[in-house]
Amino acid sequence: MRLILLGPPGVGKGTQASAIVKKYNIPHISTGDIFRANIKEGTELGMKAKEYMDKGLLVPDELVVSIVKDRLSKDDCKDGFLLDGFPRTIEQAEALDEELKNMGIKLDKVVNIYADKEILIERAIGRRICKKCGTAYHIKFNPPKVENVCDIDGGELFQRDDDNRETVSTRIEVYEKQTEPLIEYYKEKGIILDVDGTKPIEEVFETIVKGLE
Ligand code: ADP
Ligand code: ADP
């Protein structure tokens, strides 16, 4: 299964991605996670990306595209993958198309999760992430069993620097301008699966699985 998860910040891409990759046994490729890991390690890429991420802006295409190309060439992507948060611009989508063509493979589906702006803001602001494994919780909608502690590995939870109201609003605007045109791009290719992201986590997952069958 070769999939893309498309949708605005906070809509639930990462949450659904975790369940999808488990079910289909494919690698989860999140460009946001890759950048955050690089920031943590203090790499040059991380330092460059942070400048944009802190402002809620997109990291330049040339930085993102080469990382994804590299990742897709790894052995574990041979039988499928899930791209989460990539592509985010038409240029990235075109670069991906070219790369897939070179590899002789095709995308199966682009899962497009949608929800209204107010929901997105509330979800992103209440998001808490495990320092160890990156699992996302929500203080109200998906709380851990023990406050601030990851259910899976006991790691401490933290709030992303860019999950404040101001930066989230900018990220949503950036999404509308630069990423939303991708819906039409993939609609024309006939591979879009629209999913209502306002429903509870399990229900969204069931809708996605049905749509992929
Ligand atoms: P969210 O889960 O809220 O959609 P991500 O973790 O996917 O956020 O991305 C966080 C930030 O990382 C983005 O605001 C952007 O600065 C950067 N980023 C992630 N993926 C891309 C991409 N494909 N192109 C450009 N910037 C990206
Ligand atoms: P994205 O990767 O699209 O930015 P996340 O998967 O990190 O989004 O989800 C954003 C926040 O919303 C997290 O705190 C998550 O626990 C919560 N969340 C995700 N899906 C739902 C849902 N269907 N209903 C309520 N809250 C959700």
Image: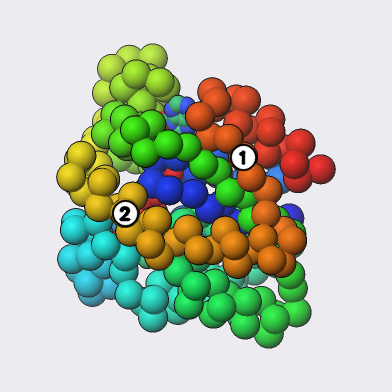
Q: Label 1 crowding class (10 Å Cα cut-off): few <14, some 14-19, many 20+?
A: some
Nearest to the observer: residue 99 or residue 76: 99
Q: Is residue 122 above or below residue 23?
A: above
Placement of 45 over or under 32, stated as above or below:
below
Query: What is the secondary structure assignment of the residue under circle 2?
Result: helix
Which residue is located at x 43 percent, y 48 percent? 8
Q: Please provide percent x and percent y for residue 203.
A: 62, 25
Going 62% across and 49% down the picture, which residue do you hit? 111
Picture coordinates of residue 143 (x, y %)? Answer: 37, 19
Q: Secondary structure at mark 1?
A: strand
Instruction: Say which residue label 1 marks.
Output: 195
Q: Quadrant of the N terminus?
A: bottom right
Res. 42 visible in picture:
no
Instruction: Give the residue type that dot 1 points to.
Output: Val
Q: Which of 8/140 is in front?
A: 8
Nearer mark to the viewer, of 2 and 1: 2
Q: State the residue position of label 2.
A: 173
Q: Quadrant of residue 133?
A: top left
- Asked if residue 152 lies left or right of residue 23, the reply is left
**Identity, as a three-letter code, of the amino acid under mark 2:** Glu
Residue 10 falls in image quadrant = top left
Percent of width and height locating residue 24: 71, 45
Whole-Å distance between the Cαs marked 2 and 1?
21 Å
Q: Which mark is residue 119?
A: none
